[in-house]
Image (spheres, grey):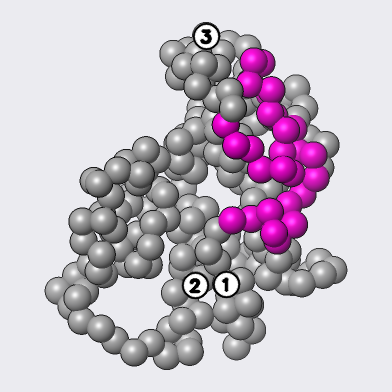
Amino acid sequence: MARYIGASCRLCRREGEKLFLKGERCYTDKCAIVRRAYAPGQHGQQRKKMSEYGLQLREKQKARRFYGILESQFKKYFEMAASRKGITGENLLQILESRLDNVVYRLGLATSRAEARQLVRHGHFTVNGKKVNIPSYLLQAGDVVAVRDKSKNSPKFKSLQETSRGRLIPKWLEFDAENLVGKVVTLPAREDIDLPIREHLIVEFYSK
C-alpha cells in the first residue's frame, strides 16, 4: 500500500498552518509551525503571489493531508460526493469525516489520525460487533464503534478510560468513556466540521 513516509511537520509548514499530524507535539513549542513558520526548502521564506489555480491546489492538498489520504483515493471521494444529492463540497467533507480512522480520532481514542489509522489496522476496533481493520471504512448513522474486549486491557486503552472522561466530543457522535464505545448519531453537517477547509476551492479544482 502506497503511503507518505516523509516528515509530518514538513507538510504543516508547506500548508502554512497546523494540520495536527503528530498529536500532543502539535500543542507544544516543539511544533514546526511555531519554530519555523515558513514553507520548507531553499526558497521557503520567499513570498510568492499565488494564482487562482495555486490556491485551489493548496486547499485540496491541505484537505488531503488533514485526513492522511493519497491523491487517487481523495479523487474517488470527490466523485462519490459529486454523485450524491446536495452540495458537493459539503458531501466531500461528510464522507471524509465518516471514515473509521477519523471517527476513532474524533472520539478521543487516538491522539492523531495517523495513530488512529495504525490502531484500526492492528484490529483494535469493532463496528456493530464485528472486527474491522480497514481505516477507510465508511460509517453510517447508527453504527457503533467499540474497542475490542481483548484490547481494553492494553496500557494504551486503560489510560484512555481514565483521561477521556469530560473530553469534548462532536455532537454528531456519542461516547461511553467507561466502556470505550462510541456511536455515530448522525452524519456531520458542515457546521459540525471545525477544520479550516474552503471546500468550494476543491470543487473548483476538480471542475476544471
Spatial separation of the CA atoms under disc 2 and disc 1? 7 Å
Spatial separation of the CA atoms under disc 3 and disc 1? 41 Å
Instruction: Choose mark 2 or mark 1, whichever is in front.
Output: 1
Spatial separation of the CA atoms under disc 2 and disc 3? 41 Å
Looking at the rendering, which quadrant does residue 124 occupy? top right
In primary-sequence order, the first of circles 3 and 1 is 3
Question: In front here: 88 or 37?
Answer: 37
Looking at the rendering, which quadrant does residue 47 occupy? bottom left
Q: Mark 3 points at which residue?
A: 153
In primary-sequence order, the first of circles 2 and 1 is 2
Q: Mark 1 points at which residue?
A: 198
Query: Which residue occupies 49% across, 72% down?
Result: 59
Query: Which residue occupies 74% across, 44% down?
Result: 172
Question: In front here: 77 or 67?
Answer: 67
| Disc 1 residue type (three-letter) | Arg
Please say if 29 is above or below 126.
below
Instruction: Classify mark 2: residues with Cα within 10 Å, few (<14), some (14-19) or many (20+).
Output: many
Does residue 177 belong to the magenta stretch? yes
Query: Would residue 27 appear left or right of 149 to someone viewing this image?
Result: left
> Residue 154, position in %: x, y?
48, 12
Does residue 81 belong to the magenta stretch? no
Please say if 101 is above or below 43.
above
| Disc 3 residue type (three-letter) | Asn
> Residue 3, position in %: x, y?
41, 51
Q: Which residue lies furthest to the left in this view?
A: 42
Q: Name the residue under label 2.
A: 59
What's the magenta region? Answer: 167-194
> Are discs 2 and 1 less than 8 Å apart at CB?
yes
Query: Which residue occupies 38% across, 62% down?
Result: 17
Looking at the rendering, which quadrant does residue 170 occupy? top right
